[in-house]
Image (tube, rainbow, N blue to C red):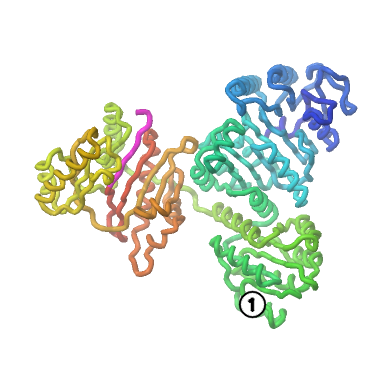
Amino acid sequence: MLDGLFYPKTVAVIGASRNPGKVGYAILSNLVKNGYAGKIIPVNPQVDEILGLPCYKDVREARVQVDLVIVVVPPPVVMSALESAAASGAKAVAIITAGFKEVGEAGATLEKEAAGFCRKHRIRLLGPNCLGLINTENDMNASFAAQMPKAGAISVLSQSGALCTAILDWAEGRGVGLAKLISIGNKADLCETDLLQALAKDEQTRVIAAYLESIDNGPEFIRVAEEVSRNTPVVILKAGTTAAGGKAASSHTGSLAGADIAYGAAFKRAGVVRTDDFESLFDFAAALAMQPLPKGNRVAVITNAGGPGIMAADAVETLDMNLDAPTAEIAEAMAAQLPAAASVGNPIDVLGDADPARYAMALEKTLSDPTIDAVIVILTPQAMSDPDATADAIIAAATGEKPVLVSFMGGAQVANARAKFVAANVPDYPSPERAVGALKAMVDYAAWLSRPPRVVARFPVNRHRVERVLSRQVRAGRPEVGEVEAKEILRAYDFNVPPGRLARSGEDAIAVAERIGYPVAMKIVSPDILHKSDFGGVKLNLSRASEVMDAYDLMMLRIGRKAPTAKLRGVLIEKMSASGREVILGMHRDPQFGPMLMFGLGGIFVEVMKDVSFYLAPLTHQEALQMLESTRSYALLRGARGEAGVDLNVIAAALQRISQLVTDFPQIEEMDINPFIVGGVGTQPVVADARMILSGV
């Protein structure tokens, strides 16, 4: 735990001010007025007293041990402030000041110097370019935010100071308490990984909500986030997901934003609950902090109006949860106590004139149903409704064994009821769709927690063969690994590659074809031609010698015209593969998170529909199957509308072998197996084409 940062006994503010319009005044005022009980030391060489506290020209003059130093001075004098902090025994420093790496090279140099000084003196550094921090447990508001939240169970990390103030306003408006709020700024020292570890050990924190624009160390983040998520839900809003957003994020904190797909894959691996907008960040965090996790995805909806019930039902189905009818026993018990016009299906419509007792009965019965995992309760205020009393009834009926989320729709008429829900730890949402979205986050997180232990298989392979191929590529200075060499590498990892050989003339091509047997495929081999079909460099189903010779002559003629400068090594003659479903397997090495595997159907599904899924290596068999399941075309793989399915397990095994290959050989930067031809269960898949790109060549 970062005790010097979160639980200091003495806080110094270097750059404290008497001027209410200055940041140095706001931070000092927040420490004083919000009840922080530790010693507060203002530092300003121009004045003797601020807010009734004696002011020092230098923090060393106070002659006390200082745990936390808040630095609010211009960049040119920050190093001097750090020297004073170190001399006073500071354990942590928060540099509020902006003007570091986010403004350019000179600022980056100064930031690096400050971080190096703090490391040398074993001082943990928050910022620079940050809002500060808040800890409600000890009433410490060491920030220049205008609001102090009440104590709660959600802790917040934010790479944006401005967003921190929006979060505080949201918390006050919703009546939700916070445990800690930390503005991490430029992350010269303390980053999201350090703070996740610290908050995971914090007894007040039940959920961590974060706004991030970048992650500095991808593999370390995944390791820590996965460890933290086992006990504490982590909800992250990742900004900079578009080219424009990424550019803005980089200019904001001087950090690389990274590929959004890679972040999605990293969060999935680590059990992080990802959100795409500010509202959902706290919708999800509130649900996870206030309610128990569901044991499954079977949802019941209780409503007093048909329209909102339909909205909820649509959202449940859209998010792949189940809206099954209650058991016959539960349905009969409810029907006996409801008006004849009521519906005991799902949604359960208790009608517009429902009183608190009717809501309580329906909720109690539904929660007792063993086939229901979670309940969403909706109320739209009618003339005969009593929202406050209904809220009391729902709160009393919610046992805490299954999650109950509510959506009291409206404004002034339900405002007091909403406050009651928050006080009772029952999350309330302004629309049914937002309640369902929050429940889906809980369902997904619960499913992640219950996943089987990760077991990454290791296959017997021929690494030395791969090393020889890669060494030849390096000696030749060729980063592009063509089809012949790529298939040699894959064969070493026990992929099924059609028999074939390189031929350098038409006669040689015929000899190879007759040796391996017709029909054959002919493909041009050139380091300058990666997309062979674009140049007429692929001929299939050649069935006799004359066809092979004609195909060879025509291919050389066309390529000579289209790519006259291309270096041609010859043609690859291969045995034609049996027909089957064409899929694509690939890998791209993300600079932050490492090798990222890709799966999708071949042809139009990749090029037009972009129906692909991604996962980070190393990969388990279960995760490989999940990659297949997460594509829209998964039904085609299983078999649909009379078409036979394919062997899903062999695709999963192939993805695992790629995972092992690219983990064993980090110089492989990219690779594609396209198409990878897969048949039914019991058939052997075939690598029809492959290519790789190496780094550092």
Q: Residue at x 46, y 55 (%)?
A: 630
Disc 1 element:
helix
**Residue at the spot of label 1:** 331
Q: How many neighbours does mark 1 have within 10 angstroms: few (below 14), some (14-19), or many (20 or more)?
A: many
Segment colored magenta: 689-697
**69 part of magenta stretch:** no
Image position of 19 with respect to 637: above or below: above
Question: In x, y percent, where is residue 653?
Answer: 36, 50
Percent position of residue 628, x then y: 42, 55
Image coordinates for residue 172, horizontal then vertical, percent: 77, 48
Q: From the viewer's side, name the closer residue of 476 and 449.
A: 476
**Residue 304 appears in the figure:** yes
Residue 202 is left or right of residue 575, and the answer is right
Up-down relation of residue 324 to residue 515 (above or below): below
What amino acid type is highlighted by mark number 1? Ala
**Which of 410/575 is in front?**
410
Going 51% across and 37% down the picture, which residue do you hit? 219
Q: Quadrant of residue 416?
A: bottom right
Extreme residue toward the bottom, this view: 340
Image vertical order of residue 362 relative to residue 254, above or below: below
Q: Quadrant of residue 295?
A: bottom right
As drawn, the residue found furthest toward the front would be: 561
Image quarter where the N terminus lies is top right
- The one nearer the camera, 376 or 159, is 159
Verify whether residue 694 appears in magenta.
yes
Left or right? Give the position of 559 relative to 28.
left
Q: Quadrant of the C terminus?
A: top left
Residue at image location 61% in from the left, 40% down from the top: 212
How many dots with numbers?
1
* Residue 119 in sight: no
Q: Furthest residue to the right?
A: 52
The image quadrant that residue 363 belongs to is bottom right
